[in-house]
Each structure stands twice: as C-alpha cells, then as structure tokens.
Amino acid sequence: METPSTRDNQAIDRKDLASVDDSQIIRLYLKTRNSVYFDILYKRYSGKIFSKCISLLKDEARAKDAAQEIFTKIFLNMAKFNEKSKFSTWVYSITYNYCIDFLRGKKKEKRLFSDEMENPPEVVDDVPDNELLEIEVTRLKVVLDKIPAGDKAILLMKYQDDLQIKEIARILDKTESAIKMKIKRAKHKAQRVYKDIFPELH
Amino acid sequence: MAARNNFKELENEELKKYPHTPDEIEHNVKGSMRFVQFIGDIVELYLPKVFDLFISLAGGERAPEEVTEHSDADMGGAAPNGEQKPD
C-alpha cells in the first residue's frame, strides 16, 4: 500500500531524477520496493551493462541473456550492497564476473588471463599508459578482441571504468600485487598484438 | 595519466551503436522481480498459518493469542450459571 511518504519520495524522484544519487535511490527502493526506483537504476546502467556484455561476449543474443541475468542478480542482491564502494563499481563487478565466468565455462579452460599459473613467469617491460590509450579507436577494438577475455576485462576495468587496483582486486578476488602484474602483462600482450596486426605503424 | 583516452572513446562508440537496450530485457527482469516478490508475499502471509495447521493436526497447542481469544469469549459469552447472555 502507498503511504504519504512513499508518494512524496516518488514525487521527488520524478521531478528531479538527475540529482538523486544511486545510494539514495537504493535506500528508497529497499524501503518501498517501488518499481519507480528500479526504473531509475535500470535506465542509468542498462546501456553500459549491455554494451559491456556485447564487448566481452561478442554475441548480441548472449549479451541479452547475460544483461538480463546480471540485472536480476543486482536487484535480488540489492540488500547486500553495503555502500563500501560506489554502486557503479558493484554493478561492474557483477557484470565482469558474470561474463568471465560465462567465458570460462564456455571454453572449459581456465586460461582467460595471459598469466595463469601454468604459464612460466616472464619479466615484461612496463608499457607506458599513453601507448595504449592513444591507439586509434577502431584499431584498439581489434586489439582488445584479439587478446584473452580476462586481459581485455582487466584493461577495461582500469582504463574504461577507472577502477582502482584495490577495487579490481576485490572484484577478481586476487591480491593487489597480483592485479598489478596482470595489468602489466595485459598491457604488454595488447601492445604485442597491436604491433603484430599493424606492423606498418611501427 | 594521459589526457587522451581512447578506451573511453571506444565505450562511447559502443554505447552509440546500441543506444537502446532491447525492451525484452527490461520486461523479463521486471517479470522475475514480480515473481520473486509474489513468492515472498505468499511465504510471508501463509507460511505461519501452514505451520499452525500442522501443529494443530499433530495435536499441538493452539497459538497463544487464539487461546486467549477463546477464553475471553467463554468468560463473556455465557453467564456463570450456564444461561446465555441476552444479545
């Protein structure tokens, strides 16, 4: 049943959606279970989640199923969101974990990252950020599609979503030093692929 | 960090490529939410009654509030000498 306070909150949200932050909307959603708040969060994140799923899974139909499951997961677990991190970080962590798990299950292998345990550790030079960040967009897409999905995901987390090392570590359940090494190797791999595919540019 | 970040540009391009997420995603997610909410409501409303029913069938005592209700009715519903009170 709608109480006067619920109606007030709806009025605030409908009037000034842009200024209401995620945490406040989550609190209101958990309190009232009103679909108005669901709609606001859905509109804010559905595009990004869907495009990330397409980018990682490379299949629109699969991306649709994935986005649907990710959203259901998010809304069913909303009460578990503890506000220690930003809501967007939490949402992306569910998205990346879902896609990585899916690809892992599909390939029936664990080597999603280029530096899994079975690979002998090799010393790699640190690739300067700007060498990757300034690759022309269409070429960057080609390069990211050629490297392992885990490496691609970790580069997207760092350079597209601006997640901090400790946040990536939490998402992938690894130590910060392991994440630093993974990023280093992913960058190195991306640079190598770039040079292989576009040798004329070097 | 460098000023230019083509990872962000790539994200923008992909968002432009799919400006609208398919409606069926929203529809299905809402459907799942409604179903879960419905099951939650059913459990919240009827589960205690089902437990009470099983307890009664097993010969257990009635819920305390029910017993109190009946005792009050017994005391007020009939006169001490056994005659019914006039309405």
Image (tube, coloured by chain):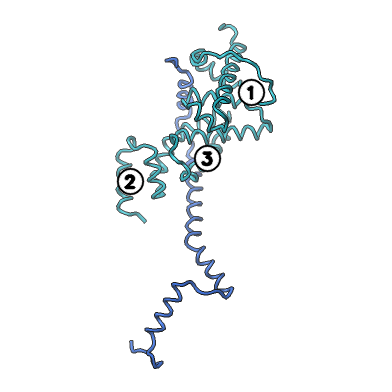
> Dividing the image into 4 quarters, which one contains the C terminus of chain B?
bottom left
Q: Are marks 1 and 3 on the same chain?
A: yes
Residue at mark 1: chain: A
Q: Is A37 on the left or on the right of A150, as rendered?
A: left
List the residue tagged with mark 1: A115
Q: Residue placed at 33% from the left, 89% from the top?
A: B86
> Dividing the image into 4 quarters, which one contains the N terminus of chain B?
top left
Q: A5 or B38: which is nearer to us? A: A5
Q: Position of residue A40 (x, y in %)?
A: 39, 40
List the residue tagged with mark 2: A10
Residue at mark 2: chain: A
* Earlier-in-chain disc, 2 versus 1: 2
Q: Amino acid at mark 3?
A: Gln
Q: CA distance from mark 1 to mark 3?
A: 31 Å
Q: CA distance from mark 3 to mark 2?
A: 25 Å
Eyeballing the image, is A116 above or below A122? below
Judging by colour alone, the chain drawn in cyan in this rendered image is A
